[in-house]
Amino acid sequence: MMRRILASAALVALAACGGGGGASSTIVPGTGPKAPALASFKLKLPGKTTMAQVRRPFYQSQATAGVAIDWSSTDPRNPNLGYSITQTCPPTLPTGITSCYLDASGSTIYTFQFDMSPGTYTFTVTTFDAAPTGTTADASSFATTANMLAQGQLAAPITINAGVDNPIPNLTFYGIPASVSFVPAPSQSHVTTVNGTMAIIGNAPQTFYAEPLDADGFIIGANDSGAPTLTVYEATTDPIPFFKVAKGTGTDQFTVTAIAAPGDGSTTGTLEAKAVANGSGLQTIQNAYKLLPVQELWTSQLFTTPDGIVGYPLLLSNAFVPTNYIDYLPDSTSLCGGSGCQFEWGTTLPDGSFEFISATAPQQVFQYTQATGSQGLNAPTAPIATFSGSQNITAITADTSGNVFYADASTNTLYATNEAFSPASLSKTGLTAAPTSIAIAPSSPNLPSAFAGAIVVGTSSGLVIYSPFNAAFSSGNPAKGGPNASSAVGFDAFGYLWNYDGANIAVYSLTGTPSNPTLNQLATATTSALGVSAGTNMFAATAQGGMWMGQGGGTVAGLNRFSSVGTSVVLNQIAGTPTFNTSTVFPAFVVP
Protein backbone atom coordinates (compact mmCIF):
# COMPACT_ATOMS: atom_id res chain seq x y z
CA MET A 1 0.00 0.00 0.00
CA MET A 2 1.51 3.41 -1.07
CA ARG A 3 0.76 6.56 0.92
CA ARG A 4 1.50 9.83 -0.85
CA ILE A 5 3.91 11.91 1.25
CA LEU A 6 4.19 15.61 0.52
CA ALA A 7 5.34 17.79 3.45
CA SER A 8 8.57 17.31 5.38
CA ALA A 9 8.06 16.57 9.11
CA ALA A 10 10.68 15.65 11.70
CA LEU A 11 8.21 13.86 13.91
CA VAL A 12 9.80 11.82 16.63
CA ALA A 13 13.09 10.54 17.98
CA LEU A 14 12.99 7.10 19.54
CA ALA A 15 15.72 5.66 21.74
CA ALA A 16 17.13 2.19 21.55
CA CYS A 17 19.70 1.01 24.05
CA GLY A 18 23.38 0.45 23.32
CA GLY A 19 26.29 2.16 21.65
CA GLY A 20 27.17 2.99 18.10
CA GLY A 21 28.38 5.98 16.16
CA GLY A 22 26.28 8.63 14.52
CA ALA A 23 24.75 8.21 11.10
CA SER A 24 22.73 10.53 8.91
CA SER A 25 20.61 10.60 5.78
CA THR A 26 18.82 13.24 3.75
CA ILE A 27 15.17 13.48 2.93
CA VAL A 28 13.93 13.85 -0.65
CA PRO A 29 11.62 16.90 -0.92
CA GLY A 30 8.01 16.23 -1.77
CA THR A 31 6.77 16.91 -5.31
CA GLY A 32 3.04 17.40 -4.70
CA PRO A 33 0.93 20.33 -5.89
CA LYS A 34 1.30 22.10 -2.51
CA ALA A 35 4.56 23.62 -1.29
CA PRO A 36 6.41 21.36 1.14
CA ALA A 37 6.09 22.28 4.79
CA LEU A 38 8.97 21.69 7.19
CA ALA A 39 7.95 20.44 10.63
CA SER A 40 10.39 19.66 13.45
CA PHE A 41 10.21 17.56 16.60
CA LYS A 42 12.87 17.00 19.24
CA LEU A 43 12.66 14.27 21.89
CA LYS A 44 15.40 12.74 23.98
CA LEU A 45 14.86 9.24 25.32
CA PRO A 46 17.26 7.82 27.95
CA GLY A 47 19.05 4.57 27.43
CA LYS A 48 19.06 1.46 29.62
CA THR A 49 21.38 2.86 32.30
CA THR A 50 19.15 5.87 32.94
CA MET A 51 15.72 4.25 32.62
CA ALA A 52 15.10 4.22 36.39
CA GLN A 53 16.79 7.53 37.17
CA VAL A 54 15.25 10.23 35.01
CA ARG A 55 11.78 11.74 35.11
CA ARG A 56 10.41 11.45 31.57
CA PRO A 57 7.26 12.58 29.78
CA PHE A 58 7.01 9.21 28.08
CA TYR A 59 7.50 5.47 28.37
CA GLN A 60 9.69 3.51 26.02
CA SER A 61 10.36 -0.20 26.50
CA GLN A 62 13.82 -1.68 26.19
CA ALA A 63 12.21 -4.30 23.95
CA THR A 64 11.26 -1.74 21.27
CA ALA A 65 12.07 -3.05 17.77
CA GLY A 66 9.48 -1.37 15.57
CA VAL A 67 7.78 2.03 15.24
CA ALA A 68 4.42 2.81 13.64
CA ILE A 69 3.59 6.44 12.74
CA ASP A 70 -0.02 7.36 12.03
CA TRP A 71 -1.90 10.50 11.09
CA SER A 72 -4.66 9.19 8.85
CA SER A 73 -4.57 5.50 9.63
CA THR A 74 -6.40 4.40 12.80
CA ASP A 75 -4.79 0.97 12.90
CA PRO A 76 -1.21 0.95 14.23
CA ARG A 77 -0.66 -2.49 12.71
CA ASN A 78 -1.24 -0.97 9.29
CA PRO A 79 0.27 2.50 9.80
CA ASN A 80 1.04 5.35 7.46
CA LEU A 81 4.71 4.62 8.08
CA GLY A 82 6.47 1.71 9.76
CA TYR A 83 10.14 1.48 10.70
CA SER A 84 12.51 -1.06 12.19
CA ILE A 85 15.02 0.09 14.80
CA THR A 86 17.89 -1.73 16.48
CA GLN A 87 19.75 -1.27 19.74
CA THR A 88 22.64 0.34 17.91
CA CYS A 89 22.61 2.83 15.10
CA PRO A 90 22.74 1.04 11.74
CA PRO A 91 25.75 1.93 9.55
CA THR A 92 23.41 2.99 6.75
CA LEU A 93 20.18 4.70 7.66
CA PRO A 94 17.04 3.70 5.81
CA THR A 95 15.05 6.29 3.92
CA GLY A 96 13.01 8.41 6.30
CA ILE A 97 15.43 8.16 9.25
CA THR A 98 17.61 11.25 8.96
CA SER A 99 19.90 10.79 11.95
CA CYS A 100 20.89 8.37 14.67
CA TYR A 101 23.40 9.03 17.43
CA LEU A 102 24.32 8.09 20.97
CA ASP A 103 24.25 11.04 23.37
CA ALA A 104 26.22 11.54 26.58
CA SER A 105 23.48 10.08 28.78
CA GLY A 106 23.57 6.74 26.98
CA SER A 107 20.48 7.31 24.87
CA THR A 108 20.36 6.39 21.22
CA ILE A 109 18.40 9.02 19.31
CA TYR A 110 16.52 8.19 16.13
CA THR A 111 15.04 11.08 14.12
CA PHE A 112 12.33 10.31 11.59
CA GLN A 113 11.51 12.77 8.79
CA PHE A 114 8.89 12.45 6.10
CA ASP A 115 6.94 14.54 3.60
CA MET A 116 3.23 15.23 3.95
CA SER A 117 0.66 17.76 2.81
CA PRO A 118 0.09 20.85 4.93
CA GLY A 119 -3.01 20.59 7.12
CA THR A 120 -4.22 19.78 10.64
CA TYR A 121 -3.26 16.37 12.03
CA THR A 122 -3.48 14.18 15.10
CA PHE A 123 -0.32 12.10 15.22
CA THR A 124 0.15 8.83 17.10
CA VAL A 125 3.36 6.84 17.33
CA THR A 126 3.13 3.22 18.51
CA THR A 127 6.10 1.06 19.44
CA PHE A 128 6.21 -2.72 19.01
CA ASP A 129 8.52 -5.50 20.16
CA ALA A 130 8.98 -6.70 16.58
CA ALA A 131 10.01 -5.08 13.33
CA PRO A 132 7.38 -4.47 10.64
CA THR A 133 7.13 -6.42 7.44
CA GLY A 134 7.20 -4.67 4.05
CA THR A 135 9.72 -3.38 1.52
CA THR A 136 9.24 0.32 2.26
CA ALA A 137 8.15 2.40 5.24
CA ASP A 138 4.85 3.39 3.62
CA ALA A 139 4.05 -0.22 2.75
CA SER A 140 4.79 -1.77 6.16
CA SER A 141 2.59 -3.61 8.62
CA PHE A 142 2.99 -5.31 11.98
CA ALA A 143 2.02 -8.94 12.48
CA THR A 144 -0.55 -9.92 15.09
CA THR A 145 2.28 -11.61 17.00
CA ALA A 146 3.99 -8.23 17.44
CA ASN A 147 3.07 -6.77 20.84
CA MET A 148 2.30 -3.10 21.34
CA LEU A 149 4.52 -1.62 24.04
CA ALA A 150 3.67 2.08 24.16
CA GLN A 151 1.83 4.76 22.25
CA GLY A 152 2.72 8.42 21.88
CA GLN A 153 -0.23 10.79 21.70
CA LEU A 154 -0.69 14.55 21.36
CA ALA A 155 -2.86 16.57 23.70
CA ALA A 156 -4.51 18.27 20.69
CA PRO A 157 -4.26 18.25 16.86
CA ILE A 158 -1.50 20.36 15.31
CA THR A 159 -1.36 22.30 12.07
CA ILE A 160 1.38 21.78 9.49
CA ASN A 161 1.76 24.99 7.42
CA ALA A 162 3.46 25.34 4.07
CA GLY A 163 6.60 27.39 3.67
CA VAL A 164 7.47 27.72 7.36
CA ASP A 165 9.02 25.67 10.10
CA ASN A 166 6.37 23.85 12.14
CA PRO A 167 7.62 22.77 15.58
CA ILE A 168 5.65 19.76 16.75
CA PRO A 169 5.08 19.60 20.54
CA ASN A 170 6.24 16.59 22.52
CA LEU A 171 4.27 13.43 22.30
CA THR A 172 3.46 11.76 25.60
CA PHE A 173 4.25 8.07 25.39
CA TYR A 174 1.86 5.97 27.45
CA GLY A 175 3.01 2.52 28.50
CA ILE A 176 0.58 -0.21 27.47
CA PRO A 177 0.24 -2.72 30.35
CA ALA A 178 0.04 -6.40 29.53
CA SER A 179 0.05 -7.60 33.16
CA VAL A 180 0.44 -6.35 36.73
CA SER A 181 2.88 -7.95 39.16
CA PHE A 182 2.10 -7.94 42.89
CA VAL A 183 4.93 -8.78 45.26
CA PRO A 184 5.70 -8.15 48.93
CA ALA A 185 8.50 -5.86 50.01
CA PRO A 186 11.58 -7.85 51.06
CA SER A 187 12.51 -8.78 54.65
CA GLN A 188 8.97 -8.88 56.05
CA SER A 189 8.80 -11.74 58.52
CA HIS A 190 4.99 -11.66 58.58
CA VAL A 191 4.71 -12.40 54.85
CA THR A 192 5.39 -16.01 53.95
CA THR A 193 4.29 -18.79 51.61
CA VAL A 194 1.90 -21.57 52.65
CA ASN A 195 1.55 -24.43 50.18
CA GLY A 196 2.63 -22.16 47.36
CA THR A 197 0.28 -19.30 48.30
CA MET A 198 1.34 -15.93 49.69
CA ALA A 199 0.23 -15.49 53.30
CA ILE A 200 0.10 -12.66 55.84
CA ILE A 201 0.58 -13.64 59.49
CA GLY A 202 -1.28 -11.50 62.02
CA ASN A 203 -2.84 -8.13 61.36
CA ALA A 204 0.11 -5.75 61.24
CA PRO A 205 0.09 -3.82 57.92
CA GLN A 206 2.44 -5.31 55.34
CA THR A 207 3.96 -3.56 52.30
CA PHE A 208 3.39 -4.79 48.74
CA TYR A 209 4.32 -3.40 45.33
CA ALA A 210 2.14 -3.48 42.23
CA GLU A 211 4.10 -2.98 39.02
CA PRO A 212 2.62 -2.63 35.52
CA LEU A 213 4.56 -4.71 32.99
CA ASP A 214 4.64 -4.38 29.23
CA ALA A 215 4.22 -7.38 26.96
CA ASP A 216 7.91 -8.25 27.26
CA GLY A 217 7.95 -8.12 31.06
CA PHE A 218 9.62 -4.72 31.47
CA ILE A 219 8.31 -2.53 34.29
CA ILE A 220 6.50 0.61 33.17
CA GLY A 221 8.17 2.70 35.85
CA ALA A 222 6.71 5.29 38.18
CA ASN A 223 9.19 7.85 36.77
CA ASP A 224 7.21 7.87 33.55
CA SER A 225 4.35 10.35 33.43
CA GLY A 226 2.82 7.99 30.90
CA ALA A 227 2.72 5.10 33.38
CA PRO A 228 -0.67 3.45 34.01
CA THR A 229 -2.73 4.28 37.09
CA LEU A 230 -2.57 1.46 39.66
CA THR A 231 -5.21 0.25 42.11
CA VAL A 232 -5.30 -2.79 44.38
CA TYR A 233 -8.50 -3.98 46.02
CA GLU A 234 -10.09 -7.11 47.43
CA ALA A 235 -12.31 -9.08 45.07
CA THR A 236 -16.04 -8.81 45.72
CA THR A 237 -16.26 -12.61 45.34
CA ASP A 238 -14.52 -13.20 48.70
CA PRO A 239 -17.03 -14.64 51.21
CA ILE A 240 -16.10 -12.02 53.82
CA PRO A 241 -13.61 -9.14 53.76
CA PHE A 242 -10.26 -10.69 54.68
CA PHE A 243 -8.08 -7.63 54.03
CA LYS A 244 -7.90 -3.86 54.17
CA VAL A 245 -5.84 -2.30 51.36
CA ALA A 246 -4.46 1.24 51.54
CA LYS A 247 -2.28 3.31 49.22
CA GLY A 248 1.34 3.52 50.29
CA THR A 249 3.82 6.35 49.94
CA GLY A 250 4.88 5.54 46.38
CA THR A 251 2.73 5.32 43.26
CA ASP A 252 3.27 1.55 43.18
CA GLN A 253 3.26 0.89 46.95
CA PHE A 254 0.31 -0.52 48.90
CA THR A 255 -0.20 -1.72 52.47
CA VAL A 256 -2.29 -4.82 53.08
CA THR A 257 -3.72 -5.61 56.52
CA ALA A 258 -5.43 -8.89 57.40
CA ILE A 259 -8.67 -8.24 59.27
CA ALA A 260 -10.22 -11.72 59.35
CA ALA A 261 -9.20 -15.34 58.91
CA PRO A 262 -11.01 -18.00 56.85
CA GLY A 263 -13.14 -20.45 58.80
CA ASP A 264 -11.62 -23.53 57.16
CA GLY A 265 -8.01 -22.44 57.61
CA SER A 266 -7.20 -22.70 53.91
CA THR A 267 -9.66 -20.52 51.96
CA THR A 268 -7.69 -17.67 50.44
CA GLY A 269 -8.74 -14.13 49.77
CA THR A 270 -8.25 -12.58 46.35
CA LEU A 271 -6.62 -9.24 45.67
CA GLU A 272 -7.04 -7.61 42.27
CA ALA A 273 -4.13 -5.54 40.95
CA LYS A 274 -5.36 -3.25 38.19
CA ALA A 275 -3.46 -1.03 35.74
CA VAL A 276 -5.35 1.56 33.66
CA ALA A 277 -3.37 3.00 30.74
CA ASN A 278 -3.66 6.79 30.79
CA GLY A 279 -3.64 7.31 27.04
CA SER A 280 -6.81 7.51 24.99
CA GLY A 281 -8.16 4.17 23.78
CA LEU A 282 -5.46 2.03 25.43
CA GLN A 283 -6.17 -1.15 27.30
CA THR A 284 -6.81 -1.78 31.01
CA ILE A 285 -5.43 -4.95 32.56
CA GLN A 286 -5.91 -6.60 35.93
CA ASN A 287 -4.50 -9.72 37.56
CA ALA A 288 -5.82 -11.67 40.53
CA TYR A 289 -3.54 -12.80 43.35
CA LYS A 290 -4.41 -15.29 46.10
CA LEU A 291 -3.49 -14.29 49.64
CA LEU A 292 -4.04 -16.30 52.81
CA PRO A 293 -4.64 -14.50 56.13
CA VAL A 294 -3.10 -16.47 59.00
CA GLN A 295 -3.93 -15.87 62.65
CA GLU A 296 -1.17 -15.09 65.10
CA LEU A 297 -1.37 -16.58 68.58
CA TRP A 298 -0.13 -14.08 71.18
CA THR A 299 0.89 -15.29 74.61
CA SER A 300 2.05 -13.61 77.78
CA GLN A 301 4.91 -15.85 78.87
CA LEU A 302 6.28 -15.75 82.42
CA PHE A 303 9.51 -17.03 83.94
CA THR A 304 10.71 -18.81 80.82
CA THR A 305 12.60 -18.12 77.61
CA PRO A 306 11.44 -16.09 75.84
CA ASP A 307 9.92 -14.14 78.73
CA GLY A 308 7.43 -11.48 77.67
CA ILE A 309 4.85 -11.07 74.92
CA VAL A 310 5.33 -13.65 72.17
CA GLY A 311 3.50 -14.21 68.87
CA TYR A 312 3.21 -17.57 67.07
CA PRO A 313 1.87 -18.15 63.52
CA LEU A 314 -1.08 -20.57 63.38
CA LEU A 315 -0.29 -22.15 60.04
CA LEU A 316 -1.99 -25.56 60.29
CA SER A 317 -5.65 -25.96 59.38
CA ASN A 318 -6.61 -28.25 62.27
CA ALA A 319 -3.98 -28.71 64.94
CA PHE A 320 -2.58 -25.18 64.78
CA VAL A 321 0.49 -26.27 66.65
CA PRO A 322 2.89 -23.31 66.84
CA THR A 323 6.48 -24.45 66.47
CA ASN A 324 8.42 -21.20 66.18
CA TYR A 325 7.55 -17.76 67.43
CA ILE A 326 7.58 -14.85 65.02
CA ASP A 327 7.33 -11.89 67.40
CA TYR A 328 8.94 -11.30 70.76
CA LEU A 329 8.77 -8.28 73.04
CA PRO A 330 10.65 -9.00 76.28
CA ASP A 331 9.13 -8.23 79.65
CA SER A 332 10.30 -4.77 80.58
CA THR A 333 11.85 -3.92 83.92
CA SER A 334 11.98 -0.28 82.81
CA LEU A 335 8.16 -0.20 82.59
CA CYS A 336 7.27 -2.06 85.78
CA GLY A 337 10.38 -2.27 87.93
CA GLY A 338 12.82 -5.03 88.79
CA SER A 339 10.35 -7.93 88.54
CA GLY A 340 9.01 -6.88 85.17
CA CYS A 341 5.35 -6.43 84.29
CA GLN A 342 4.36 -10.13 84.43
CA PHE A 343 1.33 -9.58 82.22
CA GLU A 344 -1.47 -12.01 83.12
CA TRP A 345 -4.49 -10.34 81.52
CA GLY A 346 -5.00 -8.79 78.13
CA THR A 347 -7.39 -8.11 75.28
CA THR A 348 -7.43 -7.43 71.55
CA LEU A 349 -8.72 -4.01 70.52
CA PRO A 350 -10.77 -3.51 67.32
CA ASP A 351 -7.74 -2.22 65.40
CA GLY A 352 -5.68 -5.30 66.33
CA SER A 353 -3.67 -3.62 69.07
CA PHE A 354 -3.49 -5.09 72.56
CA GLU A 355 -3.99 -3.86 76.11
CA PHE A 356 -2.26 -5.75 78.91
CA ILE A 357 -2.59 -5.48 82.69
CA SER A 358 0.45 -6.18 84.81
CA ALA A 359 0.37 -8.52 87.78
CA THR A 360 2.94 -6.62 89.80
CA ALA A 361 1.54 -4.03 92.21
CA PRO A 362 0.37 -1.44 91.58
CA GLN A 363 -1.29 -2.97 88.54
CA GLN A 364 -1.00 -0.91 85.36
CA VAL A 365 -2.48 -0.92 81.85
CA PHE A 366 -0.16 -0.86 78.82
CA GLN A 367 -1.21 -0.52 75.18
CA TYR A 368 0.80 -2.26 72.45
CA THR A 369 -0.08 -0.87 69.03
CA GLN A 370 0.23 -2.57 65.66
CA ALA A 371 3.47 -2.00 63.79
CA THR A 372 4.39 -2.49 60.14
CA GLY A 373 6.89 -4.80 58.49
CA SER A 374 8.78 -7.31 60.59
CA GLN A 375 7.71 -6.32 64.11
CA GLY A 376 4.13 -7.16 65.01
CA LEU A 377 3.72 -4.68 67.88
CA ASN A 378 5.11 -1.37 69.03
CA ALA A 379 6.11 -1.45 72.70
CA PRO A 380 4.81 1.35 74.94
CA THR A 381 7.02 3.69 76.93
CA ALA A 382 4.56 4.31 79.78
CA PRO A 383 1.27 2.95 81.16
CA ILE A 384 -2.03 4.48 80.08
CA ALA A 385 -3.57 3.84 83.53
CA THR A 386 -2.50 2.81 87.04
CA PHE A 387 -4.79 1.12 89.57
CA SER A 388 -4.68 1.65 93.31
CA GLY A 389 -2.69 -0.82 95.36
CA SER A 390 -5.83 -2.27 96.93
CA GLN A 391 -7.43 -3.25 93.62
CA ASN A 392 -7.14 -6.80 92.23
CA ILE A 393 -7.83 -6.72 88.49
CA THR A 394 -8.52 -10.24 87.24
CA ALA A 395 -9.96 -9.81 83.72
CA ILE A 396 -10.11 -7.45 80.75
CA THR A 397 -11.76 -7.57 77.32
CA ALA A 398 -13.03 -5.22 74.59
CA ASP A 399 -16.02 -5.23 72.27
CA THR A 400 -16.00 -4.31 68.58
CA SER A 401 -17.04 -0.72 69.39
CA GLY A 402 -13.91 -0.09 71.44
CA ASN A 403 -15.56 -0.32 74.86
CA VAL A 404 -13.13 -1.90 77.33
CA PHE A 405 -14.39 -3.94 80.31
CA TYR A 406 -12.34 -4.99 83.31
CA ALA A 407 -13.18 -6.67 86.62
CA ASP A 408 -11.92 -6.01 90.16
CA ALA A 409 -12.03 -9.05 92.43
CA SER A 410 -11.28 -6.97 95.54
CA THR A 411 -14.71 -5.32 95.33
CA ASN A 412 -16.49 -7.73 92.92
CA THR A 413 -17.10 -4.92 90.44
CA LEU A 414 -17.32 -4.84 86.65
CA TYR A 415 -16.18 -1.59 85.00
CA ALA A 416 -16.54 -0.11 81.51
CA THR A 417 -14.24 2.48 79.99
CA ASN A 418 -12.70 3.40 76.62
CA GLU A 419 -9.46 2.26 74.99
CA ALA A 420 -7.57 5.20 76.51
CA PHE A 421 -8.84 4.42 80.05
CA SER A 422 -9.85 8.08 80.26
CA PRO A 423 -11.69 8.21 82.58
CA ALA A 424 -10.94 4.89 84.24
CA SER A 425 -14.66 4.23 84.69
CA LEU A 426 -17.55 5.26 82.46
CA SER A 427 -19.90 2.86 84.18
CA LYS A 428 -19.74 0.08 86.75
CA THR A 429 -21.93 -2.66 88.20
CA GLY A 430 -21.66 -4.96 91.19
CA LEU A 431 -21.16 -8.74 91.01
CA THR A 432 -22.28 -11.28 93.58
CA ALA A 433 -19.11 -13.36 93.33
CA ALA A 434 -15.45 -12.91 92.51
CA PRO A 435 -14.89 -12.25 88.75
CA THR A 436 -12.38 -14.39 86.87
CA SER A 437 -12.86 -13.64 83.16
CA ILE A 438 -14.95 -11.70 80.65
CA ALA A 439 -16.09 -12.59 77.11
CA ILE A 440 -18.02 -10.69 74.43
CA ALA A 441 -20.58 -12.62 72.38
CA PRO A 442 -19.91 -12.35 68.62
CA SER A 443 -22.40 -11.90 65.83
CA SER A 444 -22.99 -15.47 64.62
CA PRO A 445 -25.74 -17.51 62.94
CA ASN A 446 -25.44 -19.89 65.91
CA LEU A 447 -26.38 -17.14 68.37
CA PRO A 448 -29.72 -15.31 68.64
CA SER A 449 -29.12 -11.82 67.28
CA ALA A 450 -29.98 -10.21 70.64
CA PHE A 451 -26.77 -11.68 72.09
CA ALA A 452 -24.41 -9.95 69.61
CA GLY A 453 -22.17 -7.83 71.82
CA ALA A 454 -23.53 -9.27 75.08
CA ILE A 455 -21.09 -9.34 78.01
CA VAL A 456 -20.51 -12.69 79.74
CA VAL A 457 -18.69 -12.55 83.08
CA GLY A 458 -17.18 -15.68 84.58
CA THR A 459 -17.27 -15.73 88.39
CA SER A 460 -16.50 -18.16 91.17
CA SER A 461 -20.22 -19.07 91.28
CA GLY A 462 -20.99 -19.31 87.55
CA LEU A 463 -21.74 -17.09 84.55
CA VAL A 464 -23.53 -13.72 84.53
CA ILE A 465 -24.77 -12.23 81.24
CA TYR A 466 -25.32 -8.54 80.49
CA SER A 467 -27.01 -6.99 77.46
CA PRO A 468 -24.74 -5.27 74.90
CA PHE A 469 -23.20 -2.19 76.45
CA ASN A 470 -24.88 1.16 75.71
CA ALA A 471 -23.39 3.91 77.89
CA ALA A 472 -24.28 2.00 81.08
CA PHE A 473 -24.65 -1.57 82.30
CA SER A 474 -28.04 -3.22 82.49
CA SER A 475 -28.80 -5.78 85.18
CA GLY A 476 -26.79 -8.98 84.96
CA ASN A 477 -28.61 -12.29 84.64
CA PRO A 478 -27.36 -15.76 85.63
CA ALA A 479 -27.38 -18.26 82.76
CA LYS A 480 -29.75 -21.16 83.33
CA GLY A 481 -28.18 -24.53 82.68
CA GLY A 482 -24.71 -23.06 83.07
CA PRO A 483 -21.74 -24.16 85.17
CA ASN A 484 -21.49 -23.57 88.91
CA ALA A 485 -18.09 -21.94 88.59
CA SER A 486 -15.90 -20.36 85.95
CA SER A 487 -12.14 -19.87 85.85
CA ALA A 488 -12.21 -18.96 82.15
CA VAL A 489 -14.93 -18.22 79.61
CA GLY A 490 -14.79 -17.46 75.89
CA PHE A 491 -16.64 -17.68 72.57
CA ASP A 492 -15.29 -19.52 69.54
CA ALA A 493 -15.63 -18.37 65.94
CA PHE A 494 -18.88 -20.35 65.55
CA GLY A 495 -20.57 -18.48 68.40
CA TYR A 496 -20.37 -21.35 70.92
CA LEU A 497 -19.45 -20.59 74.52
CA TRP A 498 -16.58 -22.41 76.24
CA ASN A 499 -16.16 -22.57 80.01
CA TYR A 500 -13.49 -23.98 82.29
CA ASP A 501 -14.55 -24.52 85.92
CA GLY A 502 -11.19 -25.68 87.26
CA ALA A 503 -11.75 -29.35 86.43
CA ASN A 504 -13.90 -29.56 83.28
CA ILE A 505 -14.02 -27.89 79.92
CA ALA A 506 -17.52 -27.61 78.47
CA VAL A 507 -18.94 -26.21 75.22
CA TYR A 508 -22.42 -24.63 75.16
CA SER A 509 -24.91 -23.08 72.81
CA LEU A 510 -26.69 -19.99 74.07
CA THR A 511 -30.43 -19.45 73.60
CA GLY A 512 -33.10 -17.05 74.84
CA THR A 513 -32.22 -13.39 75.40
CA PRO A 514 -29.63 -11.58 77.53
CA SER A 515 -32.33 -10.93 80.13
CA ASN A 516 -33.34 -14.61 80.16
CA PRO A 517 -30.34 -16.65 78.96
CA THR A 518 -30.11 -20.43 78.77
CA LEU A 519 -27.00 -22.52 78.17
CA ASN A 520 -27.25 -25.91 76.45
CA GLN A 521 -24.23 -28.16 76.95
CA LEU A 522 -22.90 -29.62 73.69
CA ALA A 523 -19.66 -31.27 74.81
CA THR A 524 -17.54 -31.70 77.91
CA ALA A 525 -14.30 -33.28 78.96
CA THR A 526 -12.18 -33.29 82.10
CA THR A 527 -8.86 -31.53 81.97
CA SER A 528 -7.20 -34.66 83.34
CA ALA A 529 -8.58 -36.72 80.44
CA LEU A 530 -7.31 -34.10 77.97
CA GLY A 531 -3.97 -33.76 79.65
CA VAL A 532 -4.58 -30.08 80.34
CA SER A 533 -2.96 -28.79 83.51
CA ALA A 534 -4.83 -26.73 86.04
CA GLY A 535 -4.18 -23.08 86.76
CA THR A 536 -5.28 -19.61 85.72
CA ASN A 537 -6.61 -19.89 82.20
CA MET A 538 -7.99 -17.85 79.35
CA PHE A 539 -9.55 -18.91 76.06
CA ALA A 540 -8.66 -17.53 72.62
CA ALA A 541 -10.59 -18.46 69.50
CA THR A 542 -9.07 -19.79 66.28
CA ALA A 543 -10.75 -18.94 63.01
CA GLN A 544 -11.61 -22.62 62.58
CA GLY A 545 -13.86 -22.81 65.65
CA GLY A 546 -11.26 -24.25 67.98
CA MET A 547 -9.86 -22.67 71.11
CA TRP A 548 -6.47 -22.13 72.65
CA MET A 549 -6.31 -22.31 76.41
CA GLY A 550 -3.53 -20.54 78.25
CA GLN A 551 -2.48 -22.20 81.48
CA GLY A 552 -0.44 -21.11 84.42
CA GLY A 553 0.72 -24.69 84.80
CA GLY A 554 3.16 -24.46 81.92
CA THR A 555 1.53 -25.23 78.57
CA VAL A 556 -0.87 -23.91 76.00
CA ALA A 557 -3.56 -26.44 75.09
CA GLY A 558 -5.09 -26.44 71.61
CA LEU A 559 -8.73 -27.54 71.84
CA ASN A 560 -11.13 -28.16 68.99
CA ARG A 561 -14.78 -28.94 68.48
CA PHE A 562 -15.71 -29.05 64.81
CA SER A 563 -19.32 -29.66 63.85
CA SER A 564 -18.18 -32.78 61.99
CA VAL A 565 -16.65 -34.18 65.16
CA GLY A 566 -19.98 -34.31 66.96
CA THR A 567 -19.91 -33.89 70.72
CA SER A 568 -16.25 -34.44 71.40
CA VAL A 569 -13.66 -31.97 72.64
CA VAL A 570 -10.31 -32.81 71.10
CA LEU A 571 -6.87 -31.86 72.35
CA ASN A 572 -4.80 -30.76 69.36
CA GLN A 573 -1.46 -30.94 71.07
CA ILE A 574 1.26 -33.13 69.56
CA ALA A 575 4.90 -33.91 70.19
CA GLY A 576 7.06 -30.89 69.68
CA THR A 577 4.50 -28.38 70.92
CA PRO A 578 6.40 -25.71 72.84
CA THR A 579 5.74 -25.58 76.57
CA PHE A 580 6.02 -22.40 78.53
CA ASN A 581 4.50 -20.69 81.52
CA THR A 582 1.63 -18.48 80.45
CA SER A 583 -1.57 -17.21 81.91
CA THR A 584 -3.12 -15.52 78.91
CA VAL A 585 -3.54 -16.29 75.23
CA PHE A 586 -4.67 -13.72 72.70
CA PRO A 587 -6.04 -14.05 69.17
CA ALA A 588 -4.36 -12.16 66.40
CA PHE A 589 -7.63 -10.58 65.38
CA VAL A 590 -11.32 -10.93 66.07
CA VAL A 591 -13.03 -13.07 63.43
CA PRO A 592 -16.38 -11.66 62.24
Image: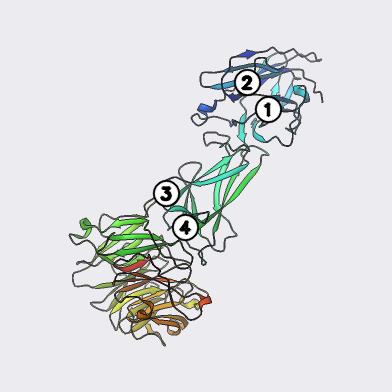
**What separation in Å lies between label 1 and label 3 (alpha carbons)?**
42 Å
**What separation in Å lies between label 4 and label 1 (alpha carbons)?**
46 Å
Query: What secondary structure is found at the residue carrying circle 3?
Result: loop
Q: Which residue is mark 3?
A: 188
Q: Are marks 2 and 1 in contact (CB under 8 Å)?
A: yes
Work out whether residue 467 or residue 27 is closer to the camera in this orientation and state it: 27
The residue that appears at 56% across and 18% down in the rendered structure is: 102
Q: Is residue 185 left or right of residue 25?
A: left
- The amino acid at mark 3 is Gln
User: Picture coordinates of residue 180 (x, y %)?
Assistant: 58, 44
Q: Are marks 4 and 1 in contact (CB under 8 Å)?
A: no
Q: Which residue is mark 1?
A: 67
Work out whether residue 241 or residue 473 is closer to the camera in this orientation and state it: 241
Q: Which residue is mark 4?
A: 258
Mark 2 and mark 4 lie on one chain; the one further toward the N terminus is: 2
User: Picture coordinates of residue 106 (x, y %)?
Assistant: 53, 22
Q: Which residue is mark 2?
A: 110
Work out whether residue 241 or residue 302 is closer to the camera in this orientation and state it: 302
Q: Is residue 117 left or right of residue 332?
A: right
